[in-house]
């Protein structure tokens, strides 16, 4: 008992008078948050302890959401440009006027030349809506930002095993004993990875970080492998070599669950060379170990032989596994052959391979859970190999990224560590075989909807989107011979292609949430020129630009019409199974955002969630699905769409609380009270997978049946992992001269070399076009944990953490150039030069320099003071990177991208560094200031003050 003369202190005062539960959007993790309100104003944000994603954990970014909401950089009203494009001079208008202007541009396009609308979206989480809208409009030119983000990771994963990392799946954190993480920036998959790594450390599991930079996750890893950029694929294939040589691969898993036993045509003169031997029913054939005869791969009761071969009709057919083993057992992939190039010692490569093998095969896990496989065979237990992996953009944003990502999946599969206890596990609706994905579509007709979804997965040359004369159908040249498997499109090529009129000019560029005139484009200065360039008659080369953003970003100044978006606390959103849900490996789950505060901007017209604005614009244009027979709007706004739209009968954007009684799971008619049910449940819905369906999902009959019940599939879709990707081989065959659909001669060698059906490694393309002795250093950017892309720099709390971004230089290079911390350096690439401040860092690959991404800001943007450090000392590496490679011998310039998917090769960049004289503290180049349409933020941000 405290003495009675002590004052009574309330150490836990009520901070709020109301708590509203919604979903964080300070990064892409979608954690659950409790927003505390006092007198209707946001007072405090905490993590939602019941939420499946974060279980109450909130990161620093998440708690700083309050300053994101009250940011002085928020847009306030629709605006039309009144000054020169790029100047930032705007006039506020009403929403009615904004829709009139937009419809005035878009309606004639739709009636005459729908392809002249290019609609591309950045980091939004509503692609199932935006793609549906674009299909209804009828333009073939739609994609989100995957082409300049991580399409290599996604496409390689889906083609190989029906899903990739991050939103597709997760390590089995409770059982993994060895975890390897490759090239992951800390702002993506933030809380889940941190929480998972925390669990590993609690349990004493080992973490190996593979990354040129030892920051973030790599700083807390038990072992850091400071690999040289662009060589991850070589390192991984050396691990594969070691495992094969030691016989440490899971043959039972390979023969049951992968295409390792599939027979491959070995006749080099055959038009089917390299394709699978198929039966009359089209099914791939394997050798039956009991009879030695070829049988369909899915025949019940057979055991497939991976050691034999089949001679039939004069042709020898051999199992995939033999081709794979031969390929990686060659001297090209020995640790000795790759060590110098990778910057990893031979002994370390051998030791890591041995550790992987030891944990996978000597520390096997068994769960006493019977299950039945897709062929009806009953298994008494679930066996797992407790090794798991995670990777992201670091390994994929290279010109060899697709094959590198494939190599990593092959390593996982050879170890038998995917979809097993302790390994890597998929989150529903994944895994999903390629057959469950659409092919790409681009069939358009004036005034009509497109003939199908824009983005998809090609199965062979017949799925390319080419005109009769071989010209690309799409403005970004996706799904062409230059990058056949560009499943996410190539947003980074849209502006330069549209400016060049290659393959054609457009009329309207419609962008959402993508800072294309600044940190989201390669060759930033030139992109700004392209956006403002005029034809001889004085018209802009890109005649109309519509842009939607929540904040006064650099891109706002380049638009003719601004549709102002809300902050994430003012909007409806839907983390949908049709798109990017919040599922866990054990559960189906989705969630919402809802306006926990009203989207009001006193004295201004106000803002609307972009998705609502898009639906309302669609109704004004009379787009199919958005208007009723009497011409009235089908949906009032996004919330109405979320509840009432059905993609298939009974299947809509939200899977939970469906049906009239709100009891439907995955399937059920629309429930008018659905959003309230989500709100009452904390903003999310979750449904646990039955115990006998928790692992082996692609081959588990109970999982497949449950997935059909929940509306993930309409029929069971069991499938095998694809060590050997036959569609890749079909493109190679065409390049070798087979088939009616032929590539241009200039691309034959690239296709033959790059589209190998088994993963390969080749040097990043940049090394082919520069003198590596002249540009000896690799240069990288990565996003910090405290920021999310460019969003954080107007956040009064977060910008105190990262107001500037020094160039981190490895110790030896630092000393060779006589640098001291705070000195300035010229960083020079084949494309440009920038002057930047330097700092020493020893936990860094010896041939690599790096900096934080998107800290540098243009003067006038983000409501920052012109003296702000971000606008003076901050800088972008983007000025050094070209979207094109230098001309080849034939004069053609190829894109600076992966030749399989078209993913932007940001991390291929090579540079040299020179000491520069000290300056007034301004990084170069300086981009002239733009006028701020929202004014300037106050010197000190004071809570409660309206901006
Ligand atoms: S990890 Fe991302 S979603 Fe989660 S609290 Fe942090 S910023 Fe928000």
Image (cartoon, grey):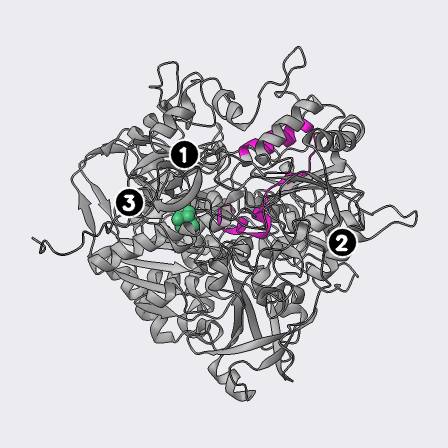
Region in magenta: 128-154
Residue underneath mark 3: 420
| Residue 440 visible in rendering | yes
Q: Is residue 181 above or below residue 646?
A: below
Label 1 element class: strand
Residue underneath mark 1: 591
Label 3 element class: loop
How far apart are labels 2 and 1 at the CA level?
39 Å
- Give the class, few, some or many, for how many residues have Cα within 10 Å of label 2's Cα (few <14, many ≥20): many
Taking the image as shown, residue 502 lies to the left or right of residue 879, namely right
Taking the image as shown, residue 674 lies to the left or right of residue 548, namely left
Judged by depth in the image, the label closer to the viewer, 3 or 1, is 1
Residue underneath mark 2: 87
Task: Report the residue at 71% width, 24% height from top.
Answer: 621
Do the CB atoms of the residues marked 3 and 1 lie less than 8 Å apart?
Answer: no
- Predominant SS along the magenta part: helix
Magenta-colored stretch includes residue 637: no
Task: Report the residue at 63% width, 26% height from top.
Answer: 616
Percent position of residue 371, x then y? 23, 33
Q: Is residue 650 above or below residue 4?
A: above
């Amino acid at each position: 008992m405290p003495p009675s003369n002590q004052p009574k202190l309330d150490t836990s005062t009520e901070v709020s008078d109301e708590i509203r539960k919604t979903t964080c959007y300070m990064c892409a993790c979608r954690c659950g948050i409790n927003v505390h309100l006092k007198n209707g104003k946001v007072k405090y944000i905490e993590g939602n302890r019941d939420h499946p994603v974060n279980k109450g954990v909130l990161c620093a970014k998440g708690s700083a959401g309050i300053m994101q909401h009250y940011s002085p950089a928020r847009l306030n009203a629709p605006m039309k440009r009144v000054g020169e494009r790029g100047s930032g001079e705007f006039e506020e208008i009403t929403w009615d006027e904004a829709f009139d202007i937009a419809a005035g541009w878009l309606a004639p396009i739709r009636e005459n030349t729908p392809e002249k609308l290019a609609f591309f979206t950045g980091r939004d989480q509503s692609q199932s809506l935006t793609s549906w809208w674009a299909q209804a409009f009828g333009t073939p030119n739609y994609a989100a930002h995957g082409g300049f983000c991580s399409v290599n990771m996604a496409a390689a994963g889906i083609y190989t095993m029906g899903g990739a990392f991050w939103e597709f799946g997760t390590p089995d954190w409770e059982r993994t004993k060895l975890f390897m993480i490759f090239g992951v920036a800390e702002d993506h998959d933030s809380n889940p990875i941190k929480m998972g790594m925390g669990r590993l450390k609690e349990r004493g599991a080992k973490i190996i970080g593979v990354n040129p930079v030892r920051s973030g996750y790599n700083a807390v890893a038990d072992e850091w492998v400071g690999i040289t950029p662009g060589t991850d694929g070589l390192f991984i294939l050396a691990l594969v070599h070691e495992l094969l040589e030691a016989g440490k691969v899971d043959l039972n898993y390979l023969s049951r669950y992968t295409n390792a036993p599939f027979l491959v045509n070995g006749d080099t003169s055959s038009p089917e060379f390299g394709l699978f031997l198929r039966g009359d029913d089209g099914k791939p054939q394997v050798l039956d170990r009991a009879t030695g005869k070829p049988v369909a791969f899915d025949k019940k009761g057979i055991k497939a032989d991976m050691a034999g071969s089949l001679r039939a009709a004069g042709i020898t057919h051999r199992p995939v596994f033999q081709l794979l083993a031969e390929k990686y057992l060659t001297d090209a992939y020995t640790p000795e052959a790759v060590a110098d190039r990778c910057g990893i010692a031979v002994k370390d490569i051998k030791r890591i391979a041995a550790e992987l093998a030891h944990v996978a095969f000597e520390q096997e896990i068994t769960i006493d859970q019977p299950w039945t496989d897709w062929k009806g065979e009953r298994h008494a237990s679930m066996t797992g190999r407790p090794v798991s992996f995670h990777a992201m953009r670091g390994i994929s944003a290279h010109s060899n990224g697709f094959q590198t990502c494939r190599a990593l999946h092959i390593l996982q599969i050879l170890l038998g560590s995917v979809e097993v206890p302790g390994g890597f596990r998929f989150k529903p609706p994944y895994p999903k075989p390629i057959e469950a994905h659409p092919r790409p579509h681009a069939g358009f007709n004036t005034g009509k909807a497109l003939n199908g979804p824009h983005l998809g997965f090609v199965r062979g040359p017949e799925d390319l989107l080419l005109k009769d004369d071989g010209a690309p159908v799409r403005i970004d040249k996706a799904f062409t011979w230059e990058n056949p498997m560009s499943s996410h499109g190539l947003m980074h090529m849209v502006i330069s292609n549209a400016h060049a009129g290659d393959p054609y000019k457009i009329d309207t560029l419609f962008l959402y949430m993508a800072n294309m005139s600044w940190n989201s484009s390669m060759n930033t200065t030139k992109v700004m020129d392209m956006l403002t360039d005029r034809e001889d008659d004085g018209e802009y080369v890109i005649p109309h630009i519509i842009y939607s953003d929540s904040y006064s970003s650099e891109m706002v100044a380049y638009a003719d019409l601004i549709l102002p978006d809300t902050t994430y606390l003012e909007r409806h959103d839907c983390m949908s199974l049709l798109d990017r849900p919040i599922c866990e490996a054990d559960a189906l789950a989705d969630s919402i955002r809802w306006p926990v505060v009203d989207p009001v901007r006193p004295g201004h017209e106000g803002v609307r969630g972009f998705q609502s604005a898009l639906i309302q614009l669609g109704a004004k244009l009379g787009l199919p699905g958005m208007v009723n027979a009497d011409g009235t709007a089908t949906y009032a706004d996004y919330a109405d769409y979320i509840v009432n739209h059905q993609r298939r009968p009974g299947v809509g954007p939200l899977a939970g609380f469906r049906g009239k009684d709100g009891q439907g799971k995955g399937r059920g008619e629309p429930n008018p009270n659905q959003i309230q049910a989500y709100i009452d449940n904390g903003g999310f819905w979750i449904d646990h997978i039955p115990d006998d369906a928790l692992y082996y999902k692609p081959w588990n009959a109970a999982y497949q049946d449950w997935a059909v019940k929940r509306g993930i599939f309409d029929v069971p879709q069991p499938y095998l992992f694809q060590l050997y990707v036959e569609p890749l081989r079909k493109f190679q065959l065409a390049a070798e001269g087979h088939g009616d659909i032929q590539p241009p001669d200039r691309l034959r060698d690239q296709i033959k070399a790059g589209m190998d059906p088994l993963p390969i490694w080749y040097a990043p393309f940049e090394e082919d076009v520069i003198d590596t002795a002249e540009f000896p250093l690799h240069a990288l950017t990565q996003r910090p944990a405290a920021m999310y892309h460019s969003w954080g720099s107007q956040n009064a709390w977060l910008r105190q953490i990262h107001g500037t971004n020094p160039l981190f230089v490895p110790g030896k290079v630092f000393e060779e150039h006589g640098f001291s911390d705070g000195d300035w350096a010229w960083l020079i690439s084949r494309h440009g030069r920038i002057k930047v401040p330097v700092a020493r860092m020893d936990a860094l690959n010896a041939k690599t320099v790096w900096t934080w991404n998107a800290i540098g800001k243009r003067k006038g943007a983000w409501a920052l003071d012109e003296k702000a450090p971000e606008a003076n000392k901050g800088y972008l590496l983007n000025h050094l990177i070209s979207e094109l490679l230098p001309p080849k011998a034939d004069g053609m310039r190829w894109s600076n991208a992966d030749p399989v998917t078209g993913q932007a090769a940001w991390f291929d960049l090579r540079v040299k560094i020179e000491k520069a004289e000290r300056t007034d503290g301004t990084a170069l180049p300086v981009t002239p200031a733009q006028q701020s349409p929202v004014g300037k933020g106050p010197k000190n941000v004071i809570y409660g003050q309206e901006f």
